[in-house]
Structure formats: C-alpha cells, structure tokens
C-alpha cells in the first residue's frame, strides 16, 4: 500500500518527536515560579529567532514550487505577524526598543535558527516540511502552556499573550485545518515526485528538536 502524508508525518513524530528532551523551564513558568527576567530573555531571543527564520523560510519558498512553496510562504508571512506580536509582549516584560536593539543573543538560543538557515541552503525543502511539522507540535504545545500561565500566574493581558496564542495554532497543529492542509499537501507532493527522504526528514527533525531544547536552556540561563 502506498504511503500517505499522514503515514509520513506520524512516522516522523515517532522517530524524532521526543528529541527536544525534558524541558525544565516551561513547567517552572507554568507554576509561576520562574522569574520575570526569564520571560524578558525569551522575548529578546525570539526577536532574533523570528527574524532569522523568516529569511530562511523565504529562501525555502524560493527553492520550492506548488504546495511546498505555499507552505513556506505561509510560514514566512506568519513570522511577520509574530514579530509584531512580540511588541506587546516586550512591553509587558518591561522592555523598550533600546533594550530589544541592544540585546546580545545567547549562543544556545540561536542554534535553532542557525540550523534552519543550514536547512534552507542544503536540504530538500519537503524534507524540511516534515521536520518542521514535528518541531512545531513541540513548540506549539509549549506556547499553549505559556499563554495560559502568563495570564494566570503573571497577570499578563490577552494582548501581551498574543504571541503565544498565535504559535499555539502553528501549521501542523491540531485544530488549524488550513495550516494542517498545507503540511499534508506539501508532503503528498513530495511523495508523488519521489524527492521526499523520510530518513533525512527524521534526521532534520531530531536536530531541530535538540536545538529547541537548547533554546529553552539558554533562556533559562544555561548558555
């Protein structure tokens, strides 16, 4: 029986879904015991991550066609939205424009966008679609937890939590039918053309999951 996009995506989660490791920071934020300085660090680092990933997604879109190009174009457009949503989050963390511009990014936090940039240059785009779908499930889950915690534990407004609400509905996340359709269409396209390599997609997913874990370690002061 021919493999479907759902088969490929489910296998990728099984093979690489646990690669982010144990996140020690998100549970602390969920319980309201992490200092507000951690929230500020997260926000400052995300300015660099989002801006870099937006360029990578545009490049991947340019290297693609059809549904795969549409997927990466949607991601890049989403990064535009995410950057704007960081402004009220930064304000809630007590950060002004000078603080954002003057921040020197942490090495551990910026390994993820460095990997994305490498993938944008070197990887088959549809393999990256599969890898990102695995990582977005992890990232979206964390953002859902943080959006609730910042409201309940830290007193942040709905506007300040908009960044987390947005990513809790990322492509590939259950509950966003349009985004999920983009993922499936791109993977089906890759299967039909024969260019999709599940082995490489799993490798890329494992790397992204690992760098995701490094990001949270860095935000928490671990690098």
Image (cartoon, grey):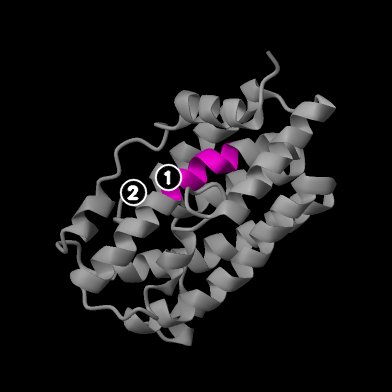
**In the picture shown, does residue 146 fall above or below 120?**
below
**Does residue 129 appear to the left or right of 192 in the view shown?**
left
Seen as rendered, the residue at the extreme top is 1
Q: Which residue is mark 2?
A: 217
Nearest the viewer among 198 and 120 is: 198
Q: Determine crowd level at label 1: few under 14, some 14-19, many 20+ residues with C-alpha closer than 10 A.
A: some
Q: Residue at x 59, y 44 (%)?
A: 115
Q: Residue 170, image x and y in percent?
A: 52, 55
Q: Residue 36, image x and y in percent?
A: 24, 71
Q: Residue at x 68, y 13 (%)?
A: 1
**In the picture shown, does residue 40 fall above or below 216?**
below
Is residue 37 shown to the viewer in this render? yes
Nearest the viewer among 91 and 171 is: 171
Q: Which residue is mark 1?
A: 138
The Cα atoms of the two marked residues, 2 and 1, are separated by: 15 Å
Query: Residue 212's quadrant in the figure?
Result: top left
Is residue 218 shown to the viewer in this render? no
**Does residue 207 appear to the left or right of 130 in the view shown?**
left
Report the magenta residues as a range: 131-139
């Amino acid at each position: 029986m021919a493999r479907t996009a759902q088969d490929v995506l489910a296998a990728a989660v099984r093979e690489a879904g646990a690669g982010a490791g144990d996140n020690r920071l998100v549970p602390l934020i969920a319980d309201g015991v992490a200092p507000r300085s951690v929230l500020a660090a997260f926000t400052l680092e995300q300015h660099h991550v989002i801006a870099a990933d937006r360029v990578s997604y545009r490049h991947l879109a340019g290297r693609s066609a059809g549904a795969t190009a549409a997927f990466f174009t949607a991601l890049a457009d989403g990064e535009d939205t995410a950057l704007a949503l960081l402004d009220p989050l930064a304000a809630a963390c007590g950060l002004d424009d000078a603080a954002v511009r003057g921040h020197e990014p942490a090495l551990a936090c910026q390994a993820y966008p460095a990997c994305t940039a490498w993938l944008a240059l070197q990887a088959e785009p549809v393999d990256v679609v599969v890898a990102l779908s695995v990582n977005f499930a992890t990232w979206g889950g964390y953002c859902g937890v943080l959006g609730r915690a910042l409201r309940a534990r830290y007193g942040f407004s709905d506007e300040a939590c908009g960044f987390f609400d947005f990513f809790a509905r990322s492509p590939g996340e259950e509950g966003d039918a349009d985004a999920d359709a983009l993922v499936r269409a791109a993977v089906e396209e890759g299967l039909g053309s024969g260019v999709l390599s599940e082995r490489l997609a799993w490798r890329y997913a494992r790397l992204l999951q690992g760098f995701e874990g490094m990001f949270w370690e860095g935000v928490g002061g671990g690098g």
